[in-house]
Structures are given as structure tokens and as C-alpha cells.
Image (tube, rainbow, N blue to C red):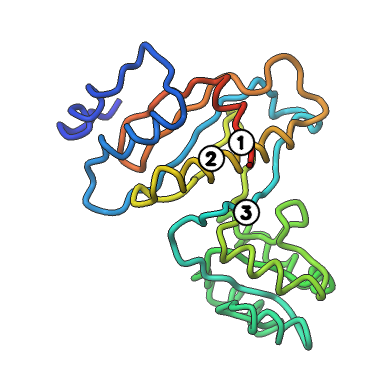
Amino acid sequence: MPKHGKKYRDAATKVDRSRAYPPAEAITLAKEVKFAKFDETVEIHLRTGLDPRHADQQVRSTTVLPNGLGKTIRVLVFAEADAAREATAAGAEFVGSDDMINKIQGEGWTDFDVAIAQRELMGKVGRLGRVLGPRGLMPNPRSGTVVDGADIAKAVREAKAGRVEFRLDRTALLHVPIGKSSFSDDALMENLATLITAINAAKPSGAKGQYIKSITLTTTMGPGIPLDLGQTLALQVS
């Protein structure tokens, strides 16, 4: 096990691991104990009671955080004709079809954060699975990144506004960012409430027993802060 540095250990002493914190108090504490010089990302980590081996116990969905993620999202859109023009007008940094596919296949280029595909082009884009899949960049209908041409502009705007995807990993955990430590407490609370609402709505049909078992809030470099499960899961978008 790697040893934590002195700054981390000092920060960890300010977190009472014997108690579960109300969400608002945890957010304030996370910002107080952060020590990195850069603007750390605030994240939540949820331990579920799901079994990832079963198809009917998977969780994968998206939501748009009202206050964004605090970073510039570079969007690539695979589109043609009117859809391509709409993607450009909506703010996509990279728009194309065969040219972009060839660039990724030939050069291994992945200098973007989100890839969106016009549904009609997925026959071609599907060839990029080996490159984009392992990086979490492959367009997928379930994540809202494979859309009809008429919906391209909306998908681009949502991606740039702070759409986040949450997906159950192999250890039955969900890891999701909710903003930056420079955000106000209210902005982080709004983002957290939006995310919790979406996670509650995404409960799979095959879930048995307790859906969410624990939730921890942390910053990129900071210690984990246990959240009060009942209070956190009760958060709703106002």
C-alpha cells in the first residue's frame, strides 16, 4: 500500500470517520481540507448492492449538471450535411465523417473529451470501437451520444454544458464528478441533487436488497468524507 503524504494525512485528521456527514456540511469540509494548488474536482463515489455480472443489474445513464463541471469540454461530432452544420453552429470543436474516422484510425487521434455520432453514421463509426472503447469515448445510444441528425445540436449543447455519464464498474461502484472545488457550496449542492435524482431514477429492474449502500464525497487529492446516506438519497431537484 502506498503511503500518503503529510498534507493528505493532515487533511484526513479533520475528517471524523466515525460519523456520516450531511451533504451540505461535507461539501464545506471538502473545500476546507483541500490542499492541492490546482482547482480540484469534487467527486462522489457510491457503493451499490448490485451484481455487475447480471445484465438486469447494470446502471448506465447521463444527466446534465445545472452548474456544469467547471472545465472546457472538447466535442467531436461524426455528422454530415445539415447535421454537420448544426453541430458546428452549436459549438462542436471537431466535425466530420470519413475524414475524422480516418484520422482516428490512422493516427490514433483522441484529442477530445466527448464523441457524438449521427445515428446514420454508426455503421462507419463502429469500426473505431477498439480505439475509442477503452478510453470511454465511443458513442453509445445509452449515453446520449448517438442521436438522430435533428438532435445533434441539442446533444452538443448538453455535452458542453456539463452532461455527465455514470456507469457501474466491475466492483459495483459508481464514480461521478459534480464540479470543482472553486464552485460555491450552493452550486455543488445543486449539482449533487441533480445527480442523485438521476441515479435514483436509474435503479435497474433486477436490483435486489439495498440499491445504494454508501456514498463518499472527496476532492481529487483529498480524503474521503462519508455522507449521511438517508439525507443524501433524499436530495431532489427543486
Instruction: Report the Cα–Cα distance between label 3 and label 1.
Output: 12 Å
Residue at x 18% of width, y 33% of height: 5
The residue under label 3 is 64
Return the x and y of residue 72 as percentages of the image width and height.
Answer: 46, 67
**Secondary structure under the numbered disc 1 in the rendered image:** helix
Q: Earlier in the sequence, mark 3 or mark 1?
A: 3
Query: Is 7 situated left or right of 163 in this image?
Result: left
Q: Quadrant of the N terminus?
A: top left
Residue at x 76% of width, y 81% of height: 83
Return the x and y of residue 104 as percentages of the image width and height.
Answer: 59, 74
How many other residues sit within 10 Å of disc 3, few (<14), some (14-19) or many (≥20)?
some
Residue at the far front in the pictured view: 238
Q: Are marks 2 and 1 in contact (CB under 8 Å)?
A: yes
**Secondary structure under the numbered disc 3 in the rendered image:** strand
Q: Amino acid at mark 3?
A: Val
Which residue is at the front of the view, 127 or 57?
A: 57
Which residue is at the front of the view, 187 or 103?
A: 187
Q: Amino acid at mark 2?
A: Leu
How many other residues sit within 10 Å of disc 2, few (<14), some (14-19) or many (≥20)?
many
Q: Are marks 3 and 1 in contact (CB under 8 Å)?
A: no
Instruction: Report the Cα–Cα distance between label 2 and label 3.
Output: 11 Å
The residue under label 2 is 192
Return the x and y of residue 44 as percentages of the image width and height.
Answer: 49, 36
The numbered dot on residue 196 is 1
Residue at x 53% of width, y 38% of height: 175
